[in-house]
Amino acid sequence: MEPDSDGSIAMVPVAQLYVRDVPGLSPPEGADLLQVLWCPFEHDDDGMPKTALFWRLAAAITDVLMDPPEPAEYEEDLVPDSCMIDPEQVIEYPHSGELEGELRQRVDQWTMAQIPGVEFGGLEDDDHPYNFLCIAPGWKIGGFIRWGMQDPYPNPCPTCGTPTEPLLTIASREWRSDIHHWIPYEDQAANISWGAYQGGPSTPTQICVSDVNDQIIRICPVSHEHPHIQMMQ
């Protein structure tokens, strides 16, 4: 949905990340803070909110707005509820659609050993159990993409052509309630009373990108000056 008015729309904060709290977050020289904002509307050209990235030095921020501008109109599902983060490092592996030949066969064999009785002949990649095991859901910095809306495809930098890398995944939910192994132990009991997609502890920010999808911001590893790109899965 596009805004009704033709005037400017104030962007809203989506994430504020300090390098000290997020191992693996690589800032440009002289910066230790990443602020991510977006327009609280899904735009017709790609179905996603437009995003803006600001790398800053936290110590240099001395004039803080007590009443920042608010958008005159917005989509309610695209204004995040405030919440604190508790970063945790996990190890991920590439999506099955990015694997080929013998490696793909070995992954199928390994997954069958973990989930007895599952047959993989003709199984679509977006339903492959391996993908639910190897790729963490939810908001995250870096990591791999759980492809599903499209097959894996290159995302080159529009400036230099270098393959871009995921910076931030903005997720509509932290986990699927019917896939238990990614649910924190402290949330599993509360999770039972909610549906598989939206609500409860799995959606602390209360946002929904399109049809409960993820919005992924990708950046060029060569230069932070190059424009970022975004995609939806």
Image (tube, rainbow, N blue to C red):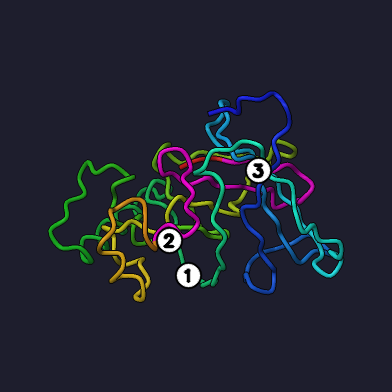
Residue located 44% across and 55% down the image: 94
**What is the magenta segment's predominant secondary structure?**
loop
Quarter of the view holding residue 23? bottom right
Q: Cα distance, mark 3 to mark 2?
A: 23 Å
Give percent across and percent down for residue 155.
Answer: 59, 40
The residues colored magenta run 202-230
The quarter in which the C terminus is drawn is: top left
Q: Amino acid at mark 3?
A: Thr
Residues at discs 3 and 1 in contact (Cβ within 8 Å): no
Above/below status of 3 relative to 209: above
Question: Where is mark 3, residue-wise?
Answer: 51
Label 2: few (<14), some or many (≥20) within 10 Å? many
Numbered circle sitting on residue 136: 2
Q: Secondary structure at mark 1?
A: loop
Mark nearer the viewer, 3 or 2: 3
Q: Residue 166 lies in magenta, yes or no?
A: no
Residues at discs 2 and 1 in contact (Cβ within 8 Å): yes
Of callouts 2 and 1, the N-terminal one: 1
Residue located 23% across and 66% down the image: 114
Label 1: few (<14), some or many (≥20) within 10 Å? few
